[in-house]
Amino acid sequence: MIRLTLAVDAMGGDFGPCVTVPAALQALTSHSQLDILLVGDPDTITPLLTKADSSLLGRLQVIPAESVIASDAKPSQAVRNSRGSSMRTALELVKEGKADACVSAGNTGALMGLAKLLLKPLDGIERPALMSILPHQQWGKTVVLDLGANVGCDSAMLVQFAVMGAVMAEELLGIAQPRVALLNIGQEETKGLETIREAAALLREAPQINYIGYLEGNDLLTGKTDVLVCDGFVGNVTLKTMEGVVRMFLSLLRSSGEGKKRSWWLKWLGRWIQKRLTKRFGHLNPDQYNGACLLGLRGTVIKSHGAANQLAFAVAIEQAEQAVRRQIPQRIAARLDAVLARSDKA
């Protein structure tokens, strides 16, 4: 296995280095062929490394950055004033070939704008899309995109997302001929916005895509499709609604029975049910699938939730490693070439 180097924006997110630094050390512990460049303020980062094992420190380097892009900064303004920031410096390391991928929990709009500016979209991609792989109730996984990079999308962009999502399902999930669906307000062909109906017509004519039709929001976790495509506004609202419900459900499981006086057998039964339900649905915990890949670029960029804890951010770092090892940008480019070539002939 070849060595990989990841650039981590250590200052991004709601918690900054107090989460990103321990997560980086956790990732180094789990992956012996991984090196990490921590980008940010050395005075803030270095004290968090004092108790780290020397073998891990040998695979970690702190790259100084002068500033941090605020999470609430307007993306256009953040991009203009981004020189010297931890996010831009991490992306520049990828552009210069000093890192294989970038991981950041910072401002999504700024990350999208800077990544597109510095790394450039692949030929045939209008705008990159945020993609995540979500678990479903059948113990499998579903590729979902776009999750917030593009608020509005035309039909051509939705088709591009479908192509990229299919490649991800093949390469990361090992699914041959993955099923692709469009998220819509109904399963009837006449339902939904014109852009969705136009995208459906294009996908039906694309032999490289195993398009199965529309799915509704209540099918997100059912496993009825391997790839679910939508615009960024709908995708972001859908994802965060689902995560909120799952977190509430798991929280209720953990707190069930607390503070109540019950006989010993009722307490035992309650704990047994709680353990069974947690085992059955614990894989839906959002912390276990944190990290959205910004697909459609000439390099690999992973966007972590801003509120991610150490476990969740470590998962995002692992996603970056997997995407690089599977050569996702190169494989998407090859598939786009095939689809575009067939479209030209048609």
Image (spheres, rainbow, N blue to C red):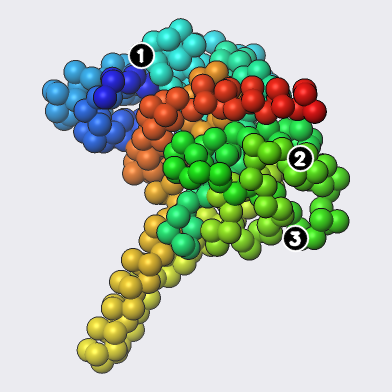
Residues packed near mark 1 inside 10 Å, few (<14), some (14 to 19) or many (20 plus): some
User: What residue type is disc 3 on?
Assistant: Gln
Q: Residue furthest front?
A: 345
Which mark, residue 63? 1
Foreground tag (1 vs 3): 3
Q: Quadrant of the N terminus?
A: top left
- CA distance separating discs 1 and 3: 50 Å
- Secondary structure under the numbered disc 1 in the rendered image: strand
User: What residue type is disc 1 on?
Assistant: Ile
Q: Is residue 342 visible?
A: yes
- Secondary structure under the numbered disc 2 in the rendered image: loop
Foreground tag (1 vs 2): 2
Q: Earlier in the sequence, mark 1 or mark 3?
A: 1
**Residue visible at 31% across and 16% down in the picture:** 62
Residue toward you, 321 or 164: 164
Residue toward you, 311 or 133: 133
Q: Is residue 74 visible?
A: no
Picture quadrant where residue 334 is located: top right
Rendered location of residue 278, percent (x, y)? 36, 67
Residue under pointer 2? 205
**Residue visible at 19% across and 18% down in the picture:** 58
